[in-house]
Image (cartoon, rainbow, N blue to C red):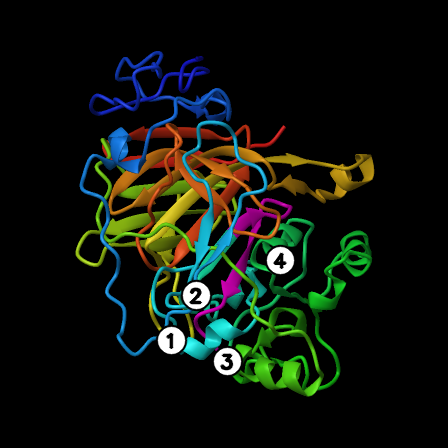
């Protein structure tokens, strides 16, 4: 098997032992950029008999979360993976209505799980429309590169509601992956004609939600910004009123079968600390997450100026609705192929981000960094994260935040601080 990270040297503050077949090259204490392409491909794996035999999970097996005794537990339903590389120790995915499968926590209201999730586009730029609304109430959030050095969020709401989510901005091809994985309504404010026409011609067209001149769908303006922010940066979605909108119009709001994730409060027995995570998309878009060991959360700090003069400036990223700083129980960095369909799309940076198959990943929870693999085992189910040995990785119950970067991105780490630099072919 080829070395774990082979293109450049990686700086470690202590000995890393993952599995005996994986060897590190160039560990000479000197820090430098490392290509993420060097993590082994999906095959061959060195299968482990169970998660307990994986070095990462040398601690006792996680115990189930305590559930309210009044919560009914329906008959278990099982989803079989459609594709799974040999050596990955997962045979089927169970479904249970007792917990929110996207957080591992009880929903704010059990009845919320009887609906279809909503995947809502949320702007991160221009900076003057911050703070955003609703990010701390989402179950899972994906951030990805759009164009011109900027990023955007797509936030999945299932177990919580928010009267204000946004500002809602335009769609991208990547959003199809999130819509399909969560079988969600895709909420966005229009798109480039190439992408919008593609969406309208797709088999998920009935799940597209865009503004109209009426009250349904429930888009609305933030009153205090009406005179200071242009309309296209002042459009918010109301997930509470969406229920009535769907019911009154006879739309499909039946809850989909979404597999349970792997969750545990028990911290993994990892060798690599991960207490600060820097992600650099461009001179205009960069941020970091810092771990709070008392609250078991990573808190987000966002750039407030570009770094063209060489100076990085940050401030806490705050949710206008809750007043809380955006935080996550799990931060997952996904390495994903970015391409263009043609020269026209390349000129406009209209990306095809291929979140199918599998790829490299890094999982951060409880102050630990885990080298991982992501798998799209089913077209209509969330991603599976495993160790390099093929055992499922248990997430901490709570919000999960995904950072999507190019497959040729670089990573450097030392003393618990990790730095990722987005790059694509």
- Mark 1, residue position: 108
| Label number found at residue 163 | 3
Query: Relative to 18, is 184 on the left or the right?
Result: right
Q: Position of residue 109 (x, y in %)?
A: 40, 78
37 is higher (above) or lower (below) than 270: above
Give the number of marks: 4
Q: For the magenta stretch, what is the residue range? A: 143-162
Residue at horizontal 25%, vertical 23%? 16
139 is higher (above) or lower (below) than 92: below
* Residues marked 2 and 3 touching at CB (< 8 Å): no
Q: Is residue 258 magenta?
A: no
Q: At numbered mark 1, what does the secondary structure look like: helix, strand or loop?
A: loop
Residue at horizontal 60%, vertical 52%? 380
- Mark 4, residue position: 179
Q: Which of the two discs, 1 and 2, labels the residue nearer the N terminus?
A: 2
Q: Is residue 50 visible?
A: yes
């Amino acid at each position: 098997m080829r070395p774990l990270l082979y293109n450049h040297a990686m700086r470690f503050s202590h000995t890393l032992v993952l599995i005996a077949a994986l060897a590190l090259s160039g560990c000479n204490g000197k820090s430098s950029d490392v290509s993420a392409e060097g993590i082994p491909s999906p095959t061959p794996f060195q299968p482990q008999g169970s998660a307990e035999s994986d070095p990462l999970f040398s601690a006792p097996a996680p115990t189930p979360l305590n559930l309210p005794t009044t919560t009914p537990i329906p008959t278990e339903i099982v989803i079989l993976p459609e594709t799974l590389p040999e050596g990955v120790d997962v045979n089927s995915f169970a479904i249970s209505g007792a917990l929110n499968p996207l957080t591992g926590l009880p929903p704010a209201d059990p009845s919320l799980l009887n609906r279809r999730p909503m995947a809502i586009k949320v702007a991160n730029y221009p900076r003057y429309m911050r703070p955003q609304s609703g990010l701390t109430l989402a179950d899972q959030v994906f951030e990805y590169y759009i164009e011109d050095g900027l990023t955007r969020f797509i936030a999945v709401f299932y177990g919580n509601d928010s009267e204000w989510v946004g500002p809602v901005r335009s769609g991208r091809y990547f959003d199809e992956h999130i819509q399909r994985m969560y079988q969600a309504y895709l909420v966005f404010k229009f798109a480039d004609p190439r992408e919008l026409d593609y969406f309208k011609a797709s088999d998920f067209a009935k799940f597209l939600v865009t503004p109209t001149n009426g009250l349904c769908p429930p888009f609305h303006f933030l009153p205090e910004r009406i005179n200071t922010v242009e309309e296209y940066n002042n459009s918010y979605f109301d997930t509470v009123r969406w229920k009535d909108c769907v019911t009154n119009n006879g739309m499909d709001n039946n809850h989909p079968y979404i597999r349970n994730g792997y969750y545990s409060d028990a911290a993994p027995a990892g060798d690599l600390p991960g207490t600060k995570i820097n992600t650099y998309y461009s001179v205009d878009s960069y941020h970091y997450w810092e771990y709070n060991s008392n609250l078991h959360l990573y808190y987000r700090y966002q750039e407030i100026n570009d770094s063209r003069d060489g100076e990085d400036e940050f401030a806490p990223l705050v949710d206008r609705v809750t007043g809380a700083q955006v935080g996550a129980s799990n931060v997952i960095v996904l390495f994903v192929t970015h391409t263009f369909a043609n020269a026209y799309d390349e000129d406009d940076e209209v990306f095809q981000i291929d979140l199918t198959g599998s790829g490299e990943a890094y999982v951060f929870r409880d102050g630990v960094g885990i080298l991982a693999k992501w798998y799209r085992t089913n077209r209509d189910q969330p991603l599976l994260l495993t160790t390099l040995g093929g055992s499922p990785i248990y997430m901490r119950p709570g919000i999960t935040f995904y950072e999507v970067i190019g497959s040729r991105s670089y990573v450097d780490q030392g003393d618990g601080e990790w730095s990722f630099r987005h790059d694509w072919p």
